[in-house]
Each structure stands twice: as structure tokens, then as C-alpha cells.
Image (cartoon, rainbow, N blue to C red):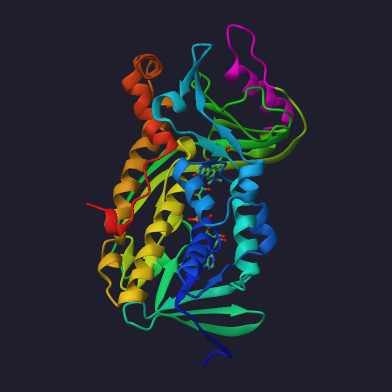
Amino acid sequence: MPPSRTLRTQVGIVGAGPAGLLLSHLLHLEGIESIVIETQTRAHIEERVRAGVLEHGTVDLLNATGLGDRMRREGLVHHGIELRFNGRGHRIDFHALTGRGITVYAQHEVIKDLVAVRTSAGGQILFEVAEVRIEDFDTTAPRIRFQHDGEDCLIACDYIAGCDGFRGVCRPAVPAGALRCYEKVYPFGWLGILAEAPPASDELIYANHERGFALMSMRTPQITRLYLQCHPDEDLSLWPDDRIWDELQRRFATTDGFRLNEGPIFQKGVTAMRSFVTEPMQYGRLYLAGDAAHIVPPTGAKGLNLAAADVFVLSNALAHAFRTGSEARLARYSEICLRRVWRAQHFSWWMTSLLHRFEDASGFDHRRQLAELDQVTSSCAAATTLAENYTGLPFTLPGEYS
Ligand code: RFL
Ligand code: PHB
């Protein structure tokens, strides 16, 4: 069936998460047209509760590209985190160790800023599309088919960016055998809540406790974000608010009587945890970016930041290709991103292994974790390694890469 509506653009972008929207914005700044298609509604993506920590490099990129106004006003700049174990807190001073910090600013706020900037620049984002299929991306004339407003639509483009997350359609559209996937699934998940309560500490607290991991983060000076380790398929109906607070208070308890501030819980969810990498992140004229290409467990706060780093490289390589006709930079896209992705994979796996309770772990394993935490919090070299990775590696462009 011929489509009832045909659109033409330079880059067709599948998915309006941080990767797809930021790519569209960066391309616009390079004078390149794109169309973003998204299965969800605008309200859904602007309210979906996810990440909260922006690396130093992500903050610089948002500021440098005109996306920083609200983040600078409302984001919370942090210069360290606390690691808590054996009933005591130990601060890792990022600023003293690396001269850098992080910014706590919710992912859905970044999304709102991106949608606003794209919309005001006349950018096209088509929400509530269905039946998305990508075709002919092994030729110079790739196409995206989908339904929108009851019509069969087609986007004809020069390149496709697969920014449709872990469960999207782009990665599975690549012929079998062309991509190699590496995966590790963890035997636990995180139960996350948002509560109307002031954070009990100014900085994030990562707690290793014999009952399981817990994390205190925040969204604003009035809203606390909390997570506790649970089963990957935990039944939320077994977790009334009292039980959640009781469990959190136990895991954060210190010998000097620390208490979380409690308040009404207005959001609850369970996230399973996995590590996943696709190699390469490209096939023909399809380029995968963000969660479509890789997933990290949230312990290292890297997922959103990796998505930003990918599209920073991709927008630069696409701009170079449109400007010069040379695909030399695009050819290095995957290699450049994967180096950072594997560093982030290692860091996220390491933070996860250090802080969680593993069901088959012995007393020896727990003691070993505590010894490592002792090292990380007392050795300047070990603390610097954590601080460098947490605040983020520098963003690298194809032209600068060696
Ligand atoms: P997204 O955000 O999943 O966006 C993909 C978009 O594609 C749409 N889509 C489609 N659109 C069109 N056609 C299709 N066929 C489609 N299929 C799907 C989806 O609706 C969606 O809008 O991927 P993207 O852009 O790659 O961004 C990745 C980040 O969202 C993710 O890595 C982070 O949220 C991970 N993460 C964290 N990352 C950090 O950097 N710092 C953190 O502190 C942090 N904490 C977290 C996290 C993720 C969490 N969860 C819930 C998984 C904490 C949690 C609890
Ligand atoms: C969050 O604020 O949601 C958050 C912070 C740190 C993490 C993961 C999530 O490692």
C-alpha cells in the first residue's frame, strides 16, 4: 500500500527520549533537518520518572547549546556523595579529588526543556505514532514507515537514528548475526519512590546494608527520591508506604541516630537491572544511540549521560558527512562511543557489585565488600577513581579521538 503521507528530511529519528531529542537539537544547531517520531504522548514523556544525575560533561553540553537556563536555576549542584556502611557515612569529595561536580536535575525536566526548544525552533516531533518499521537502511535511501493520526506515513531520509530505547524496533530490525550483543542480568531490582519530604542530607547517600542496598537522592529541596534493592519482579502491592519507610530507615540507620524525613509517597515503581551492549552501534545508514544500543544498571547514574555522549559524537559526524560528503567520521562513531560505553559498563557493574547484597553471597563476600568500601573511602587513589568515573569522562569528538 502506498503511504497517504510522505515526508522528507535529512535524519529520521526514532524515539523522543533524551537521545532522540538532544540529537535533533544538536543537528538543528548544525543546520541539519530532522523529524522525531515517538509512540507515547508528549505528556507521558514529560512526566516519566527516571534518572536524576547529570555528569559534568552533560551539564557543559546542555549549557553550551542553549538548554541550561532552567537547569542552572533549578538544578542542584553537588560536590560529593556519601557511601554508608557499617552504620557510618563516608564522604567522597568529588570537588577536592577532581575539581568537578554533578548536577541533580530530573530527566523529565531535561525532556521538557528539549521539547520546548525543538518546538519553538519549528522542529517536528510526531507523538503517538504506531506500527513503526524502518526499511532500506542498507541503501542510501532509508525509510521509516508508521501510522499517525489514522494515516499511513513514510519518512524518506538520508540517515536513521535509532533512539528508541532498549525495547524499540530499530535494533531488532538489523539482520540476524550483524550485531553482537553482550548482556548481564542482575538477580535484583530497585524499588523507587518519590516522597514529599525534604532530603535528610544535602548529598546522595549510597548505602551497603546486610538487608540490601539503598540510595537516597532528591529532586528539589522539598522532594526526596529513594530506592531500595528488591527482587526484579517485586510485587508493589506487598509494599504499603509504612513497610517502605520502615525498610528504608533500617538500611540508612547509623550509629549516631540518622533518620530519613518521611512524607507522602506520590510515585512508586520497580526497575529490573541489566548490563547490555550492542556492537557495533551501526548498520548501514542506521545509527543506534542511547539505551537502544546499551543499558547500564542505574547504580553509576550513567544511562542518560551515555545517551548524551553518543548523540554528541553522532551529530558531529553527521554534520561532517553533510558538509563534506565524507563518511569518515561516521565510520568511527561506534568505535568512539563503545570505548566510553565499556568504561561506563565497568564502573556501573563495579558500583553495583560493591553496594548490593547478592543472594548466594557468603560471609566472606560481604566482608570483602566492606574491605573494598574501606579502601575506597580511605585511599585517595581509590576515591579519585570513583570520583573521576562518577563525575564523568570528557566528551570526545571524532576529530579529537586517537
Ligand atoms: P529512552 O529514554 O528509553 O527513550 C526512548 C524513547 O523511544 C520511544 N520509543 C519509540 N518511539 C517510536 N517508535 C518506536 N517503535 C518506539 N519504541 C520506543 C520511547 O517511548 C521513548 O520515549 O532512551 P534514551 O533516549 O536512550 O535515554 C536513556 C535514558 O532514558 C536512560 O539511560 C536513563 O533513564 C537511565 N537512568 C539514569 N541515567 C543517568 O544518567 N543517571 C541516573 O541517575 C539514572 N537513573 C535511570 C535512573 C533509569 C531508571 N529506570 C527507570 C530505568 C534511574 C532509573 C530508576
Ligand atoms: C536518581 O536521582 O534517580 C538517581 C541518582 C543516582 C543514581 C540513580 C538514580 O545512581
Residue 210 in the image, given as x and y percentages of width and height? 49, 18
> Who's the residue at 36% across and 42% down the image?
345
Q: Nearer the viewer, residue 91 or 326?
A: 326
Residue 89 is left or right of residue 315, and the answer is: right
Give the answer, above or below, for where 167 lies relative to 357.
Answer: below
Seen as rendered, the residue at the extreme top is 256
Q: Nearer the viewer, residue 27 or 19?
A: 27
Is 247 a magenta residue? yes
Question: Is residue 350 visible in this depiction of the protein?
Answer: yes
Residue 241 is left or right of residue 355, and the answer is: right
Give the quadrant of residue 162.
Answer: bottom left
Give the answer, above or below, for where 356 lies relative to 398.
Answer: above
Q: Quadrant of ligand 2?
A: top right
Question: Is residue 181 visible in this depiction of the protein?
Answer: no
Residue 41 in the image, given as x and y percentages of width and height? 67, 64
> Who's the residue at 52% across and 93% down the image?
2
Seen as rendered, the residue at the extreme left is 402
Is 43 a magenta residue? no
Residue 103 in the image, given as x and y percentages of width and height? 55, 38
Residue 50 in the image, given as x and y percentages of width and height? 58, 46
Magenta region, residue range: 239-260
Q: Nearer the viewer, residue 15 or 360?
A: 15
Q: Nearer the viewer, residue 273 or 321?
A: 321
Seen as rendered, the residue at the extreme right is 264
> Who's the residue at 53% across and 11% down the image?
87
Residue 55 is left or right of residue 217, and the answer is: left
Give the answer, above or below, for where 233 lies relative to 139.
Answer: above
> Who's the residue at 64% across and 13% down the image?
258
